[in-house]
Amino acid sequence: MTTPDATTPDVRRHAPLEQPRATQVRRAAIPLVLTLLLLTGLMLGIGELLTHHAGAVGRLDVRIERSLAAHRSGTLNTATKYGTYLAETVPVIVLAVLAVAVAVIRTRRWRPPLTIALAVIGEKVVYLIVGTVVTRQRPPVPRLGAADPSASFPSGHTGSAVTLYSSIALVLLASRARPVWRAIAVVLAVLAPIVVAFCRMDRGFHHLTDVVAGGVIGLVWLLVVNWAVLRPYRDRVRRDAVAADWLHAEHGSRADDAAPETGHAAAPDPGAGGRGHARA
């Protein structure tokens, strides 16, 4: 039998006591509310600056958009049309509801589904406030589709792509899901925002700074949600996994220690014959 050393997790110790649910919610809510306020205020300032004093940045935005519009093709237009669906309102709502439901069923915990819901909803709150106040005009190029002409900043599609797919990936990583699902989720989390941002720019709906702002909103908000809501769940899963691994190793060590004794008692002595029985 092995004895745990200083580096071996002692699973016999009591796990840290969980705080009351109300306390957990309060501690998570404070950084979330502060982040919403600060992020909204920051983006309002940046949006107003780009709307009225864009300068060289604004001119670069326009040059990029005109270059993209000049290189459109039928095939590319079709591809960007379907690429935009990754972050359209209806698909985002459907995928988010499904992801929340699966998280509830699979984890039996409140933090993973709340992470996905808060990530998507919080980004939309910031987007709606900033998009309503900031009246930056859309790029001066033909648009492939209909949209509000004065709602260019920020890109809500890009922000939704970041929060939806990345929150799902974070939950799968924290829950120690199957490697194939984790890999798919991570690839989607990386590629979806890039694809959506390009599609929105190529179709004439947003400047480069608009999609960057949308991505920043989504990323910053997601990081705070991950830290405030999902982190305790992830830490608990890791702690349980370490304890399970240690118990498995301890059980294996005990089996190895007992095996020679069992084998010695059961093994016959070929040379003993009747003498062995007499001694017994």
Image (cartoon, grey):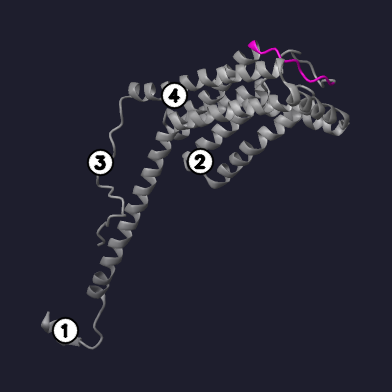
Characterize the local packing of mark 3: few (<14), some (14-19) or many (20 or more) Cα atoms within 10 angstroms. few
Residue, disc 1: 276
Residue, disc 3: 14
First of labels 4, 1 by sequence position: 4
In the image, the segment drawn in magenta is 133-141
First of labels 3, 1 by sequence position: 3
Q: Quadrant of the C terminus?
A: bottom left
Characterize the local packing of mark 4: few (<14), some (14-19) or many (20 or more) Cα atoms within 10 angstroms. some
Q: Nearer the viewer, mark 4 or mark 1?
A: 4
Residue at 48% of width from left, 32% of height from top? Answer: 226
Describe the element under mark 2 as helix, strand or loop: helix
Q: Nearer the viewer, mark 4 or mark 3?
A: 4
Going by the image, does 231 lie left or right of 260?
right
First of labels 4, 3 by sequence position: 3
- The spot of residue 121 in percent (x, y) is 55, 20
- Determine which of the numbered discs, if any, sits on residue 31 in the image: 4
